[in-house]
């Protein structure tokens, strides 16, 4: 959602302030790269990605993990997170994902863990931002009728994994999230 406002990936490493009818809210962007890596990929891949986000000023914030369910409640995530991990990949040493990941954070002293509250106290919002009415990309996919969902998924995957199409991918939107409530009334 942040990227569709026109900001760059590097600009998503800061907090922003948004408002509606005079009420303000500080907002942070969840990092999509890390979101899709953890816990599915070995921990060193997340650390290597984090190295690409460093700047000299040290005021960037990379928000990690959006769905706590991924840390043991989904599909085979319990096995990955708490039992077998990713084997003996670089730095994982046969440990489950969660202990291996925290060990990577501890061993890489240049990573400075910080809570969002601590970040807000230490750094001001970068600027005002108005985010589009949207939802997480999967919800926008699920909101579509089945026949359109298949076409949308094909288009999305062709754009998402093509480095030359990233500028187009950030503007791709699925269905309006509220339509999910029409398909699946409470």
Image (spheres, rainbow, N blue to C red):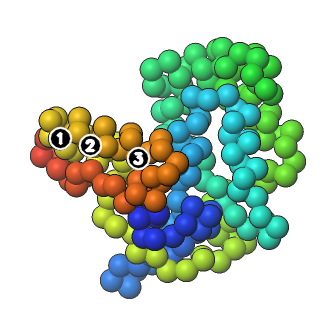
Identity of the residue drawn at 53% across and 53% down: 30
Q: Position of residue 28 (x, y in %)?
A: 54, 63
- 56 with respect to 179 (left or right): right
Residue labelled with disc 2: 152
Q: Residue at x 76, y 50 (%)?
A: 51
Sort mark 3 into few (<14), some (14-19) or many (20+) by Cα contacts within 10 Å: some
> CA separation, marks 1 and 2?
6 Å
Circle nearer the N terminus (2, 3):
2
Q: Secondary structure at mark 3?
A: helix
Q: Dividing the image into 4 quarters, which one contains the C terminus?
A: top left
Q: Residue furthest front?
A: 164
Q: Nearer the viewer, residue 3 or 104?
A: 3
Q: Where is residue 145 shown, x and y percent of the image? A: 14, 40
Q: Dot 3 corresponds to which residue? A: 159
Distance between mark 2 and mark 3 Cα atoms: 11 Å
Is any atom of residue 184 visible in this view?
no
Q: Is residue 181 left or right of residue 16?
A: left
The residue depicted at 68 percent of the width and 40 percent of the height is 46
| Residue 78 quadrant | top right
Q: Position of residue 106 (x, y in %)?
A: 83, 40
Task: Answer few, some or many: residues within 10 Å of disc 2's Cα (few below 14, many 20 plus, some between 14 and 19).
Answer: some
Q: Is residue 176 left or right of residue 35?
A: left
- Asked if one can make out residue 168 in the rendered structure from this viewpoint, the answer is yes
The residue tagged 1 is 148
Q: Nearer the viewer, residue 41 or 150?
A: 150
């Amino acid at each position: 959602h942040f990227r569709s406002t026109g900001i760059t990936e590097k600009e998503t490493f800061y907090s922003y302030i948004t408002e509606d009818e005079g009420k303000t809210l500080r907002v942070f962007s969840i990092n999509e790269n890390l979101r899709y890596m953890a816990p599915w990929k070995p921990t060193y891949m997340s650390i290597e990605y984090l190295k690409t986000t460093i700047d000299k000023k040290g005021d960037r914030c990379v928000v990690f993990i959006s769905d706590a369910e991924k840390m043991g409640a989904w599909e085979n995530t319990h096995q990955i997170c708490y039992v077998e991990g990713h084997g003996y990949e670089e730095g994982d040493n046969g440990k489950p994902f969660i202990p291996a990941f925290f060990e990577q954070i501890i061993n890489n002293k240049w990573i400075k863990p910080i809570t969002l509250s601590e970040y807000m106290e230490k750094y001001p919002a970068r600027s005002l931002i108005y985010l589009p009415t949207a939802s997480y990309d999967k919800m926008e996919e699920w909101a579509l009728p089945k026949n359109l969902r298949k076409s949308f998924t094909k288009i999305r995957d062709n754009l998402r994994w093509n480095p030359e199409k990233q500028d187009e991918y950030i503007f791709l939107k699925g269905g309006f999230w509220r339509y999910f409530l029409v398909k699946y009334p409470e």
